[in-house]
Amino acid sequence: MDTGKDIPTANGQTHGTGRRALLGAAMFGAGGAVLGLPGSARAAQARTAGHGGLKSLPKPTIIGHRGASGYRPEHTFGSYQLALDLGADIIEAGDLVPTKDGHLVCRHEPEIGGTTDVASHPEFADRKTTKVLDGVPTTGWFTEDFTLAELKTLRAVERIPANRPHNTLYNGRWEIPTFEEVLQWQDEQTRKRGKQVWIYPETKHPTYFRKLGLGLEERVAKLLRKYNKDNRNSPVILQSFEPSSIQRLNKLVDNPLVVLLSGATSRPWDFVEAGDPRTVADLITPRGLREIAGYAQGIGPTLDLIIPKDADGKLTTPTTLVADAHKVGLILHPYTMRNENPFLPAEYRKGTAVDAYGDPFGAFKTYFATGIDGVFTDNADTGLLAREDFVNG
């Protein structure tokens, strides 16, 4: 997912009814106390996770944001694997963008200058260009200008080294994964671990890519069908910042669907292109949420839509979004919890170092108390400990 949350802060976002009913009946209670169960009961529940759809996930659900990106370069198998090892309930694998020859690969953005070593490849120097991506002039190298074979010669690097200098140790270690490789990895890990592995891919900039003749949704659906993962109980949740992408997916597959929501004053890019004047603030009204509930099962709001911050960066009073969404049967998986100071509410920071940890446990507790159903986090191990404290506290 992409919004201002992802900018490194060096200074101090007729199928529907059945899926929705499944969530509404099951999500608010089932699995809620999983960490309070005895070890054998927890193990038994873990083994069945995935077979009952979303109701089988613990609550609040801990979602490994781009894997374990607090510890490894994001959207690599090193990051995904570590997130599983740390115990994440779902792995966000991955943010899906297309190659020139139509394959889907996992990158945070189509511009890959900041997440790969492409700049050090002289053979690709002439691919550097400036494009307008969702209204923003962006300079760099773009996945849609490379074949898959060319992208496979690149290696991933840490995206925010100022905040995560230790992650640079792993620069150059892993290649860019394809979505098909992720689906195969998911099956392999499910067999090896004896429990269902869940993934949470996102369609990135779908309107932009559709205009280039590289529509994402049909490609996603084709791969999900190929691996028999296009059903309402399939362990694959699909998400997008563009509601029309989710509406398109709703017609193609039966998977659980989530609309991502950025800042209240922002407009989804498909709305901009279509001349729809509504903002995210309109989408999170009771009326807007009812509309979303007609084609999706959940929302992924920025944490600031759950609890706004004041001018000093401190948390204020929670909004009614959790209650309003639950009232229409939607779950909430807000984003993104990170351990480093700059990404935490001001009252949970410790010192001023941009690569130092603050008090994420305090922040997790405050957000969990609002009744959210899960959270995206770069640090799944921290999130799991925080959930244990919250559930058993």
Image (cartoon, rainbow, N blue to C red):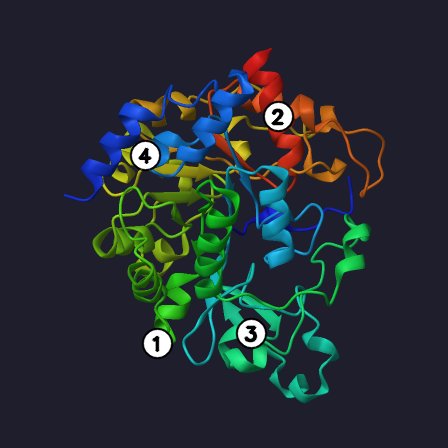
Question: Would residue 386 be found to the left or right of residue 246 on screen?
Answer: right
Q: Secondary structure at mark 2?
A: helix
Q: Quadrant of the C terminus?
A: top right
Which disc number belongs to residue 142?
3
Please name the residue that numbered disc 4 is placed on. 52
Q: Nearer the viewer, mark 4 or mark 3?
A: 4
Question: Disc 3 residue type?
Answer: Phe
- Please tell me how crowded label 4 is: few (under 14), some (14-19), or many (20+) other residues with Cα within 10 Å: some
| Rendered location of residue 165, percent (x, y) | 81, 52
Question: Disc 4 residue type?
Answer: Gly
Q: Nearer the viewer, residue 240 or 73?
A: 73
- Determine the CA span between mark 2 and mark 4: 27 Å
Q: Residue at x 63, y 68 (%)?
A: 175
| Rendered location of residue 207, percent (x, y) | 37, 64
Q: Nearer the viewer, residue 75 or 173?
A: 173
Label 1 or label 2, whichever comes before in sequence order: 1
- Determine the CA span between mark 4 and mark 1: 37 Å
Q: Secondary structure at mark 3?
A: loop
- Please tell me how crowded label 1 is: few (under 14), some (14-19), or many (20+) other residues with Cα within 10 Å: few
Q: Residue at x 56, y 24 (%)?
A: 367
Please name the residue that numbered disc 1 is placed on. 213
Question: Disc 2 residue type?
Answer: Phe
